[in-house]
Amino acid sequence: MPVIYLALGSNVGDSNTYINESIQLLKNRLTDTKEAPRYTSKAVGYTDQADFINTAIRANTNLSPKELLDFVKSVEEKVGRIKRFRWGPREIDVDIIFYDDQIINETGLHIPHARFSERDFVLKPLRDLAPNFVDPRSKQTVKALLDKLPPSELSIYRAMA
């Protein structure tokens, strides 16, 4: 059964509740889920917005990559995500970071996620779950990718209890 890694983030309303609800819904189609610690980070891209709470989960699934994409988008919709603008505020954002060691580049589906290796708010929770997981594109471990980020690119400022 494929192992997947998903990144979750929220910065609208009660972010922890949105993340909790998303994880519960994800568990309807995923097995053996494990959640990373949560972190608070500054917004990236469009910075004039509230800080984010971020985490990641590791899970197994019988869904194909396309089915998984459709499923996570349905979870976002059920939890109440409102589409605003690119990099804008989000009730919940669920991104597929890895699907086993597959590389997929299709319209609307890019695995590994296109910019995950540039974002500490994705890499740090992933490192907590699987520091030695090798990114199939760069052939580097999650830990190595996080360690090489320059200080100017770091957005996490607090680990949550």
Image: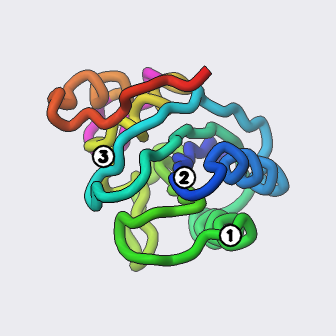
User: Disc 3 or disc 1, which is closer to the eye?
Assistant: 1
Q: Give the labeled residue for mark 1.
A: 80
Earlier-in-chain disc, 3 versus 1 = 1
What's the CA distance linking mark 2 and mark 3?
A: 27 Å
Quarter assignment of residue 150: top left
Q: Nearer the viewer, residue 10 or 71?
A: 10
Q: Looking at the picture, does residue 142 appear above or below residue 119?
A: above
What's the amino acid at mark 3?
Arg
- Residue range (magenta): 131-140
Q: Mark 2 touching mark 3, by CB under 8 A?
A: no
Q: Mark 2 touching mark 1, by CB under 8 A?
A: no
Q: Classify residue 132 as left or right of residue 36.
A: left
- At label 1, counting other C-alpha atoms closer than 10 Å, the crowd grade (few under 14, some 14-19, many 20 or more) is some
Q: Mark 3 touching mark 1, by CB under 8 A?
A: no
Quarter assignment of residue 3: top right
The residue under the point 35% across, 27% down is 141
What's the CA distance linking mark 2 and mark 1?
A: 11 Å
What's the amino acid at mark 2?
Ser
Q: Position of residue 8 (x, y in %)?
A: 56, 48
Q: Main secondary structure of the magenta part?
A: loop
Q: Give the labeled residue for mark 3.
A: 137
Q: Looking at the picture, does residue 111 appear above or below residue 84?
A: above
Earlier-in-chain disc, 2 versus 1 = 2
Name the element at disc 2: strand
Quarter of the N terminus within the rendering: top right
- At label 3, counting other C-alpha atoms closer than 10 Å, the crowd grade (few under 14, some 14-19, many 20 or more) is few
Which disc number belongs to residue 10?
Answer: 2
What's the amino acid at mark 1?
Gly
Name the element at disc 3: loop
The residue under the point 30% across, 46% down is 137
User: Disc 2 or disc 3, which is closer to the eye?
Assistant: 2
